[in-house]
Amino acid sequence: MNKIAIIIPSRLNAKRLPNKPLKLIKKREMILHVYDTAIKSQAGEVIVATPDEKIIEIVEKNGGKAVMTKKEHETGTDRIFEVFENSLKRNAEIIINLQGDMPNLDPMAITNLVDHMKQEKCDIGTLASQLEKEDLEDENVCKVVVREDLTKNNFSSALDFYRKSNSKNLDKNFVYHHIGIYGFTNEALIRYVGLKRSNLEIERKLEQMRALENNMKINVAYIDNSPLSVDTEEDLNKIKKIMESK
C-alpha cells in the first residue's frame, strides 16, 4: 500500500463566512483554487469531502472529484476519515487534510509535507511560517510552539498550539504562524478519530490538541510564505487583492 490521498473538507455553513467555498476569486470559486493547488502538487489523488450538493456540482463540473459526506461531523478530520474509510477503503498510506480556505498555498508546500511523511518520523506533519507582530494577539491566527528554530531545522516537534496568548506562551522562544494543513499516516488517522475530543481541543477549538494530549508526535516544517486562511469577509478581500494582482 503506497497510495497518497489529499482530501479537502469543505462545507457551506461556516458561521463567520457562510458559503465560503463558493466565494469568487478571479472569477473562480475558492474551492476550485484549493483543488487546483492540490492537483499542481502532483502528490496524490485529490478528493473534496463535503455535505453540500452545490460544492459537489462545482467540483465535478470542473473535472474534479468530490464525495458526499454526512452533515453531522464535529470536525474536518472526521469528514476526512469518512472518505478514507468508505471511498478509499482505508487504502492510503498517507492522508493529507488540506483546508478548503487557503487558495494561495504554494503547491510545493504539499509536496514537501508528503515527502516528510514518507520518512515515517512522526504521526502527524504540518506547516508553519513566520509570525508577524500584528498577529501575536490576533485570535484568528493559530500559533504553534516548537522545540527548535524552524528556520535552521527542516522539521521540529510541536509542543503547543494556541490562539490567545498568555504568559506561558510568551515565554517560549520558537513560536510560529501555524498553517492549516495536516499529513497523517494511515495508522495515526485511525487512532486519532478513535480518541475522545480532548479538553484543550474543545476549549481552544483546535483539533490538533487532541493529538498532543494523547502523546501523538506532530512534526512542523517551515515555509517562507504565509498563505492566508479565509475566515471572514475582510480575509476574503485581502486574498482577492493578493491573487488578483498576479
Image (cartoon, rainbow, N blue to C red):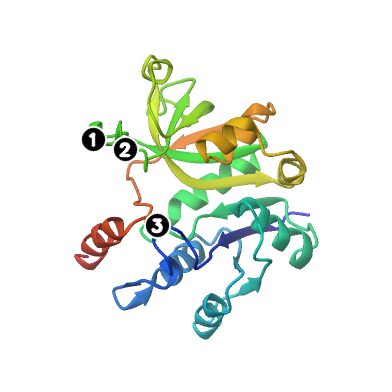
Disc 1 crowd, CA 10 A, few/some/many (<14, 14-19, 20+): few
Q: Which residue is drawn at 44% across and 57% down?
A: 107
Discs 1, 2 touching: Cβ within 8 Å? yes
**Three-letter code for the amino acid on which mark 2 is drawn:** Asp
Q: In this view, does 171 lie to the left or right of 126?
A: left
Q: How far apart are marks 1 and 2 (CA)?
A: 7 Å
User: Which residue position holds label 2?
Assistant: 138
Residue 176: assigned label: none
Specify which label sits upstream in the sequence, 1 or 3: 3
User: Disc 1 or disc 2, which is closer to the eye?
Assistant: 2
Residue 16: assigned label: 3
Q: Which residue is drawn at 56% across and 46% down?
A: 182
**Three-letter code for the amino acid on which mark 1 is drawn:** Glu
> Looking at this rendering, what residue extends furthest in the bottom direction?
61
User: Which residue position holds label 1?
Assistant: 134
- Residue 116 x/y as whole percent: 57, 40
Q: Residue at x 64, y 65 (%)?
A: 71
Disc 2 crowd, CA 10 A, few/some/many (<14, 14-19, 20+): few
- Residue 215 x/y as whole percent: 68, 26
Specify which label sits upstream in the sequence, 2 or 3: 3
Figure check: 239 above or below 153: below
